Image (cartoon, helix red, strand yellow):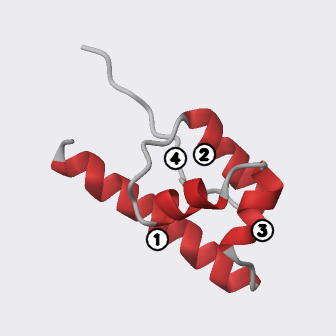
Amino acid sequence: MATTQILTQKAIAERISHILEKKGLRQQFLADTLVKPKSYISLIMAGGANLTLSTILEIEQALGEPIFRIENKPVKVH
């Protein structure tokens, strides 16, 4: 696994943890809402899961907040 991918997974885990803490929620909330095993949520929170875009979207919907913020910048085509 590439170092950049590991850092990204840990950043996602930290962002999810921050949102859960801010809202007073626990990992069990995500497991129940996403209908996923608690062990899978623990893997995500440890930065060990290679998340699909659809899973990230499901987590964002469950939390009611974005995990990523994508800035809308013009792209230059050469």
Tell me the residue at 39%/63% (across/down): 11
Give the mark, 2 or 1, whose residue is nearer the N terminus.
Answer: 1
Earlier in the chain: of badge 1 and badge 3, it is: 1
Residue type at numbered disc 4 = Ile
For this rendering, which residue is in front, 75 or 38? 38
Compare marks 4 and 1 and give the one earlier in the sequence.
1
Viewer-side label of 4, 1: 1
Query: Residue 58 location in percent, x, y?
Result: 72, 45
- Residue at horizontal 57 percent and vertical 53 percent from the top: 40
CA gap between label 4 and label 2 equals 14 Å
Residue to which mark 3 is pinned: 29
**Quadrant of the image containing the N terminus:** top left
> Which residue corresponds to the image point at 78% horizontal and 49% vertical from the top-left?
35
Is 3 located above or below residue 1 in the figure? below
Report the side of 37 relative to 1 (left or right). right
Kind of residue indicated by mark 3: Phe
Q: Are marks 4 and 1 in contact (CB under 8 Å)?
A: no
Q: Report the residue marked by disc 1.
A: 14
Asked whether disc 3 touches disc 4, contact meaning CB atoms under 8 Å apart, the reply is no
User: Whole-Å distance between the Cαs marked 4 and 1?
Assistant: 18 Å
Crowd class of label 2 (few under 14; some 14 to 19; many from 20; radius 10 Å): some
Q: Specify few, some or many for label 4: CA neighbours under 10 Å numbering under 14, 14-19, or 20 or more.
A: few
**The residue under label 1 is which amino acid type?**
Glu
The residue most toward the top is 78
Q: Nearer the viewer, mark 3 or mark 4?
A: 3
The residue labelled by disc 4 is: 70
State the residue position of label 2: 56
10 Å crowding of disc 1: few (<14), some (14-19), many (20+): some
Residue 37 drawn at (x, y percent): 67, 53
Q: Residue at x 65, y 56 (%)?
A: 66
